[in-house]
Image: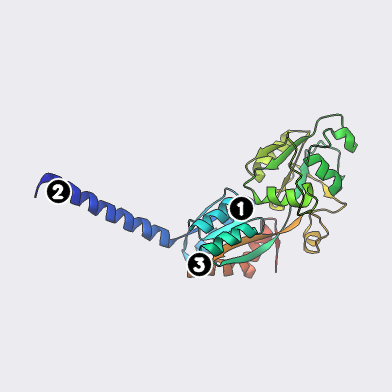
Amino acid sequence: MKLLEKKKILCLFSLVIALGSSLYAKSNVLQLKGSDTLLHVSQAITEQYQKETKTRIAISGGGSGIGISALLNGTTDIAMASRSIKAKEQELAKAKGMKIKETVLGFDGITVIVNKGNHIKNMNTRLLAKVFRGEIKNWKELGGEDAPIVVLSRDSSSGTHEFFKEHIIRERNSKGRQEYGKKTLYLPSNEAIKQEVAKNKNAIGYIGMGYVDSSVHSLEIDGKTASAENILNKSYPISREIYWYSNQNLSENGKSLIQYALSPKGQQIIKQEGFVPIK
């Protein structure tokens, strides 16, 4: 056999092995992708699930929109989302012959945070909207110091960004066209916003309640704190559900993971991570 023919056969054999290995890896590793808000709690759930079942799981963030896109493209098994799936995403799924299942994992209260040196403790939703639209630019307009307000937001791929825009900036008006102010600084994660607020006395931002700690101060909104009770009875004005989305043909391992997340063990993890369980 000629040397060239041997090389061709060897390359083809190597390609078959590589392809087989790739397909094997894909079929045996459960993929979760999406919301950075849900990243820590989903990691905590999957880590415990892996210990009990030996299931191989890979998990990554990027934002709710990226997770749902990955689900629709077939590159993830479960999309983590801090917002509900959009009508246009549902239409795309239908066009692809997919039936998307929505699983509510628990509840979150988007928490508005300021620096611990800021003396503002409460804000109503009307003023909050004006701050994030850039209409109120100085803390003295709110009874604070004479200093410019530094507004921080999640980036546009974030479900939290979308939810906050719909419920605060556009004041729950589905036909609203208001946007974040021109000087808004967009950051890639809850942790990045928290760290910036902790070191910048003039900053204001929002994060998922599971990321709040003593390094920042949480504002009351309309006189309500982001407590479990206020989120469950929906008196806290920026309350929301948190989701996992999957396709109807999800593997048995995937279905088992979802059931685990909804079990008493899974719900206890959700509570420990700072969110509000559904049970």
Label 3 environment density (alpha carbons within 10 Å; few <14, some 14–19, many ≥20): some
Write down the quadrant of residue 192 in the picture. top right
Residue position marked by numbered label 1 in the rendering: 64
Q: Secondary structure at mark 2?
A: helix
**Identity of the residue drawn at 49% across and 66% down:** 53
Circles 3 and 2 in contact, beta carbons < 8 Å: no
Where in the figure is residue 278, as x and y percent of width and height?
70, 66
| Count of all numbered marks drawn on residues in the image | 3
Of pointers 1 and 3, the one earlier in the residue sequence: 1
* Labels 2, 1: front one: 2
Query: From where the camera sits, is residue 165 visible?
Result: yes
Say what secondary structure mark 1 lies in: helix
Kind of residue at badge 3:
Leu
Q: Residues within 10 Å of mark 2 (few under 14, many from 20)?
A: few
Question: In the picture provided, is 29 more to the left or to the right than 146?
Answer: left
Indicate left or right for 176 with 46 as reference.
Answer: right
Label 3 belongs to which residue? 250
Amino acid carrying label 1: it is Ser
Left or right: 241 as drawn, with respect to 246: right
| Mark seen at residue 5 | 2
User: In terms of sequence position, does the residue under pointer 2 or pointer 1 come before the other?
Assistant: 2
Inter-mark Cα distance, 2 to 1:
49 Å
Q: Which image quadrant: the C terminus?
A: bottom right
Work out whether residue 142 or residue 68 is closer to the camera in this orientation and state it. Answer: 68
